[in-house]
Amino acid sequence: MGRFIGVLTCQPASLSVCRRVGLLGACLALAVVTGCASSLPLPTLTSTPTPLPSPTPWPTPTLYPTRWPTATPEPPDTGWQIVQSGVELRQVRVETGSAAERLAIVRLDPQAVRFRVHYDSAAPRPLSAWGSHFQTLLVVNGGYFTPEYETVGLLISAGRAWGTPYGDFAGMFAVTAEGQVDVRWLRQRPYVAVEPLQEAVQSFPVLVKPGGVMGFPADADDGRPARRTVVAQDRTGRILFLVAPRGYLSLHELARFLADSDLDIDVALNLDGGYSSGLWMPANGEGVEIDTLVPIPSVIVVDSP
């Protein structure tokens, strides 16, 4: 005889009962599965530990000095230092209110050196380039020139003359064919065209008049400071070139310093200044190298005879 399997049919009135029966069955099934799972042995987990990286050592710190080295201050006056026979260098600090100028002064025995004037309006160059070209003891800038690099006042190089002579307000650095050198005030000793001059540069103003008299009063000065170049002669006949490279001195201040100094100056003449001012004397690292800030067409060259 066959088995009869009844089918439970839920009527609407007994729908909640059916839902309870279904929920009860689901819970029983979940319990059976959970029980089976709990009876299974858990797998053994094994792991190989990752070694930790070796620590990087810290760099040893550099120990700074407890006190930084102090820069050696410039001496107010170096005194005369011998560069070679007949050539001396001195550097002097000149106070000008809130600033200080540093004068470079070269003193030359005319019997120990030779002076020449060079002029090239077609190929102006900075003073350092003039120095490299001649490879000589000393080179200093000359007189004034136009924007076309042509000399304004009289200039004589190797006996040949350029420019127009100034009047008696100016001065002149002059070298004869025999090598006699002097710095003059043209009011006292005017230039004569028939003079046998081999080298010459005219410029202005005269800062110290013959006899050591201060020659540029305050009322003649506009008071503007600038870089300066000076050629002078002392009472024993030695020639001095002075450069004020920092640009802190007016013409009157410079004239007053020269007249009151211990340089024993008889006469001093201002050469071109500003960007054109410079003095180049390497002296194997023992001299001074003050370059011009612009090309210049003329220089005074000093070398050994």
Image: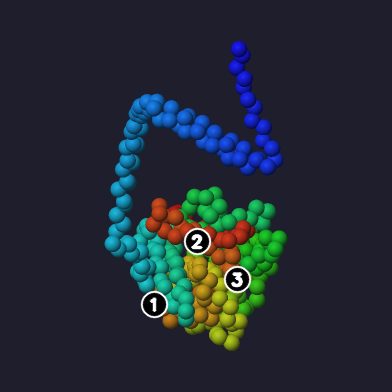
Q: Which amino acid does label 1 sit on?
A: Asp
Q: What residue type is labelled 2?
A: Ile
Q: 267 or 187: which is nearer to us?
A: 267
The residue labelled by disc 3 is: 203
Image spot of residue 186 (x, y percent): 59, 76
Q: With respect to residue 84, does 92 lie above or below?
A: below
Query: Relative to residue 92, is residue 142 drawn left or right?
Result: right
Mark 3 or 1 closer to N-term? 3
Using the rendered image of the protein, determine whether residue 128 is visible from the camera's viewpoint. yes
The residue labelled by disc 2 is: 290
Q: Which amino acid does label 3 sit on?
A: Ser
Question: Number of callouts in the render?
Answer: 3
Residue occupying image coordinates x 55% and y 54%: 130
Q: Which quarter shows the N terminus?
A: top right
Residue occupying image coordinates x 52% and y 50%: 132
Q: Which quarter shows the C terminus?
A: bottom left
Label 3 to label 1: alpha-carbon separation: 24 Å
The residue labelled by disc 1 is: 262
Image spot of residue 138 (x, y percent): 48, 58
Label 3 to label 2: alpha-carbon separation: 21 Å
Outermost residue toward the bottom? 219
Q: In which quarter of the image is residue 50?
A: top left
The crowd level at tag 2 (other Cα within 10 Å; few <14, some 14-19, many 20+) is: some
